Image (cartoon, rainbow, N blue to C red):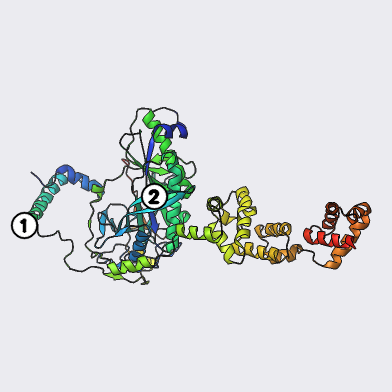
Amino acid sequence: MSTNVLPTYDDVVSRYEPVIGLETHVELGTVTKMFCGCPTDFGAEPNTQVCPVCLGLPGSLPVANRAAIEATIRIGLALNCSIATWCRFARKNYFYPDMPKNYQISQYDEPLCVDGYLDVEVDGELVRIGIERVHLEEDTGKTLHVGGATGRIHGATESLVDYNRAGIPLVEIVTKPVPGLGARAPEIAKAYVAELRDVIRTLGVSDVRMEQGSMRCDVNTSLNLPGAEWGTRTETKNVNSLRSVERSVRTEMLRQAMVLDGGGTITQETRHFHEDTGDTTSGRSKETATDYRYFPEPDLVPLAPEPVWVEQLKAALPELPRQHRARLKTEWNLSDLDMQSILNAGAVELIERTVAAGASPEAARKWWLGELSRRANADGVELEAVGATPEQVAKLQVLVASGKLTDKLARQVLEGVLAGEGDPEQIMAARGLEVVSDTGALTAAIDEAIAANPEVAEKIRGGNQAAAGVLIGAVMKTTKGQADAKTVRELVLARLAS
Amino acid sequence: MAAISREEVAHLARLSRLAVTDQELDRLAGQLDVILQSVARVGEVAADDIPPTSHSVPLVNVLREDVVVPGLTRAEALSGAPDTAEDRFRVPQILADEE
Ligand SMILES: [Zn+2]
């Protein structure tokens, strides 16, 4: 291995071309497991959602879940794949206690869906990512390693296994290798996973929550010199957030460039991604496909999806995220740039829900991209975790539109919402933030301001309306900013016109 | 020409996490070879017009509805386990030193 220093990213992409590939696992949100009737609730007590089938007890037989097959076909269709007219499950044999059968039921050379693509928008440009296959398998149990350092497998003296997750339907979506992305490879990898997540969420077949593990990514990366053959790839596992997808590609590009620069060669291996440091480390050497000794699963008969059924599923696909975004852009009357800033802020759905709750698109956009984005940035959280709901924002805007709040007061109410003080109306009442619209109180304040500034009043009487600012300021001060400046101006001018 | 080599048997044993002695390897390699050669004779009979068969019943699409069927209680699930701890199956060290 080389002792070279890590090159800079710009340097790496000026000399090497990356090829990436992504394998994404998605746990389906079916009520029951893939091959048995056990429930799939997240967070249940260990080993309480198990039966003879998913524990691999002798004599038990699997039967495939129709809803899982349907969900997989729908994913395939949404990714523009061809759906197999006949295919089989396969046994992937490996001796590891996360599967009690000593094999995992998967699909090997006959996946349910093949040869599709997903168009991903990056900075307004469309990048087409080829989809090699979408297949269905079963998830594994969860192992808890005891005796080693911090739950890691190395150094563990024993492992404790919970089979609640074993047998939950798991869809694997594999891209074709993607060359030609250059410096944008990490960013496009992330955009692909984000788009895939949105597509699957739209289909309603999984909650696709990366932090809970219902969506997990393995990222393949290789480097080659321009014009040369593709390099040896590594497969980075444990990539469990969108940010990590981007970071892991980048990290691996830098590491591989360092090895190659030093005259070394890349070993085809599994590497583990570490969220805390952003580094990858070498994992156990991968068993080869031959070592898994795949063969057709004898306990399950082949699948032959009826073309009529597939056509029905295709016709019933919902509007997919990209079409949906295009429609919103038109409905909200936005420029490309406006739409892009909404997308970059991750605010599409938030704005959509705010509009649905009664705000105008302009106002909803203003709140989420303005005040709330600033707050989210300052707090270092995602916009959706900022602490205000679309319903609360809509309520706030309705109060502004009806004249009960000025923009300034609305921002104070929003402070209260973000501080967890309740809904806008409660906060208005508790903080006494309503616009002073009582004409009697306003007239008194105006008279007071005129009395205190006779020379200004004289100027206004003489036709100098610009001088009104002084009086308006004085009234706003008396009313602690809770008057509508425009109303005050009108009242001041009317008072001095007579 | 043997259908399976002694090295291949050793490799399979390792994949299956089985500790096999040299004597056992000699014996098992011979026995597996006989089995594989017998199976290979069946393959010789199959002509080109006979497609490989993976299932003996001519059925497709045997599916179940996505409806919960009560399974085992935890006590029942763990009752057959050689060892348990913290409501889980307890198994020996998974990765040997070479990995
Ligand atoms: Zn089960």
Residue underneath mark 2: A128
The residue that appears at 23% across and 64% down in the rendered structure is: A302
What number of labels is visible? Answer: 2
The residue that appears at 8% across and 51% down in the rendered structure is: B37
Q: Chain of mark 1?
A: B
Circle 2 SS class: strand
Quadrant location of residue A109?
Answer: bottom left
Q: Position of A18 compared to B2: left or right?
A: right
Location of residue A354 in the rendering, given as x and y in whole percent from the top left corner? 59, 63
> Does the residue at mark 2 contact the one at mark 1 (Cβ under 8 Å)?
no
- Residue B45: which numbered mark, if any? 1
Specify the amino acid type for callout 2.
Answer: Arg
Spatial distance from mark 2 to mark 1, Cα to Cα?
48 Å
**Viewer-side residue, A91 vs A376:** A376
Circle 1 SS class: helix
Q: Chain of mark 2?
A: A
Task: Name the quadrant of the C terminus of chain A.
Answer: bottom right
**Viewer-side residue, A87 vs A358:** A358
Location of residue A26 in the rendering, given as x and y in whole percent from the top left corner? 39, 57
Quadrant location of residue A391?
Answer: bottom right
Q: Is residue A1 visible?
A: no
Whether label 2 lies within 8 Å of ligand 1 gets the answer: no
